[in-house]
Image: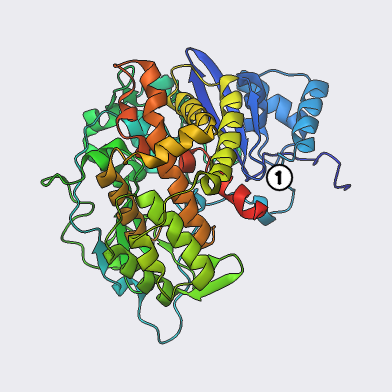
Amino acid sequence: MSPNALPARPRLAAHVLARRHLVGEEERIILHDLRTGELLQLGPREWGLLSAADGTRDVEGIVIAAAREGAPARVPAAQAFFAQLHAAGLLGCEDAGEDAAPSASAAPRPSALPVAPALDAGARDPRERPLEVLPDFSLHCDGSGSCCRIYASILFDPEEAARARALRPEVLSGGARHERAFTPERGAWPCAASVVAMRDGRCAYLEGEGGVGRCSLHAAGGPAAKPLGCRTFPTSFIDDGESIRISVSVECACVLASVGRPGGAPLIDPRLRARGDLDDRIDVAALPDRAEVAPGATAPRAELVAWSRRLAAAAPPPDVAAGLSSLAAAVEAEGLTGDAIARFERPDPLEPAALGPWLAALHRRAARRAREDAAWRSERDLARRATQWIAAATFALADPDLLAALLLSPPRAPDRERFTLRAALHGHRLLGALPLSLALRDRAARLVVARALPLVCAEAGPDGDPACAEPIALVEAMLRGHGLDAYAADMARAS
C-alpha cells in the first residue's frame, strides 16, 4: 500500500486524544494531536463515524456500524472524511507498532521521566526502597473543585467508570451507555482507561456553578468513589534510586494555601513505609541513570540527587526567581561543582534582557492557544480564561520598563515561591526533558509570570475566579496540563 493511500481499515492513531466537551448543550469532540500540538474539532456525527473505525472495518463497514448508532453517512462522504484525517496524520497504521492500543500505564505522566527500569540481577528490590515524604507539609483541601475545572483529561479505569455511572447514572445519560459519558484515553477504540466528558471545561461529575463545585461522586459514594488519580492528586511519586520521593505538584490553589498550616491531611497514609506498600496502580516515575545538566553535559543520577539535596538545604534568597537565574548561569559555567549553590543564595539581580526571550516564547504559545480555545471552548471555561490571562500577562511584560519595575519590586508571596521550589526539588521536578540549567530558567520565568498575573486577573473584578487566589498554582497547572510548557522546549531548540 502506498504510504499516502488511505488505510483499508482506518482507525484513529494512538497519538491522538479524543475529548468530548459540552459547551452549553452543544457537543463537540476535539482531537488533540500529541505529535504536532494541532487541534481538530468534530461534531457528533463525525465522531460516530470515527468511533466505529476500530481497525477491523473498511469504510463501508464503518458507515453501516455508525448508522446503527445513530450517525448515518454516505460512503463517499465517509471516504472523504477519513482521507482528510489521513492527510493530517491522524490515522493509525494497519500494523501494530506505535499505534497499538495502549494500556492504562501509557497515560500521560506528570513529568517527562521514564518508567522505573527492570531489576538487575543482584540489585536490591526497588519495592524495598523507603518512602521519603515532603516534610512539614499537610494538605488542606477546600473542596471548591478548582482542580476539576482546569485539566483536559480526568482518567477512569473500567471499574472506576462503571462505579461512577452506577452512582450517577443521570450524568450525560451515561448509566446505560459508557460512551455517552466517556471517550477512550487514546485513539477511538475501547482501552484500559477512559476520559470523562467535560461540561464548560468542568468534569461532568462536578456539581455547582461558577468558580466552585463539589464532586458528586464523592458526595454519593465517599472518597473511594473517585478515580485513583483524583484521590492521589496532587501527590507525585519519583524513584531516584535511593528512595521514593513523595512530593506535591504545585498546581492547585489548596497546595499553596496549606503552606505553614498544620493539621491537614498527610500526602500518604503514614503507615506506609516502602514502595511495595503503595497501591500497584500508582504511577511511580524514575530518574534516568544520567541526565543533562546543561546543553551537551550530563551527570550521573547519584550526583544529581546529592546536589538536589544540598540545594534544598540552602538558604533561599529573598528573590527566588533571581536565585534560580543565577544558579542556571553557574551550572552552565561550572556544572554541579564550584560555588553554584552559593550563587543561588546570593544571586545577581534578575535582568529583563535575560528574561525577555523566555517570556516572549511563552506569550507566543499562550496567544496561539488562546486563539484556538476561542473557537471551541466555553467562555466560562477556566482553562480558556487562564490561557488568556497568561497571554495578557506575558504581553504586558514585553514592555521593558514594566518588566524592570516588576523585577525591582519585592515578591508578593515569597513564602509561596520558596515552597514551590522546595516541593519541586523534593520531587525532582527540575530533572526531566530539559537540561537542568534550562529548567532553572524556566522556573524563574514561571514565577515572574505568576507575579504579574494578579494585575490581569484583577480585571475580572473583586469577585473573580477563586483559582486566581494562588497565581503560581494557576501558572503551573496551565503549563503542564495544557502544554504551554512546550515554550521551554522552543527556547532549548533556539539555544
Q: Position of residue 70 (x, y in %)?
A: 61, 18
Residue 240's x, y, as percent?
38, 69
Examine the image and state in which quarter residue 91 appears. top right
Q: Is residue 21 visible?
A: yes
- Nearer to me, 457 or 347: 347
Where residue 181 appears, as percent x and y from the top left, is 45, 27
Q: Is residue 260 left or right of residue 38?
A: left
| Front one among 50 and 238 | 238
Outermost bottom residue: 122
483 or 349, nearer to the observer? 349
Occupied quadrant, residue 455 = top left
- Horizontal relation, residue 154 to residue 58: left or right: left
**Residue 461 against residue 40 in the figure, above or below:** above
Q: Residue furthest top?
A: 25
Residue 371 location, quadrant: top right
- Which of 398 and 56 lies nearest the eye of the viewer? 398
For this orientation, the residue located farthest to the right is 2
- Dot 1: element: loop
Residue at 32% from the left image edge and 38% from the top image edge: 252
Residue 474 visible to an observer of this rendering? no
Say which residue appears at 46% left-offset and 38% top-offset: 404
Q: Residues within 10 Å of mark 1 (few under 14, many from 20)?
A: many
Number of numbered discs overlaid on the protein picture: 1
Q: Amino acid at mark 1?
A: Gly
Q: Quadrant of the C terminus?
A: bottom right
Above or below residue 15? Residue 425 is below
In this figure, which colouring scheme has been used for the structure? rainbow
Q: Position of residue 289 (x, y in %)?
A: 49, 74
Q: Residue at x 35, y 81 (%)?
A: 124
Q: Name the residue: 29% across, 23% down.
A: 212
Residue at mark 1? 92
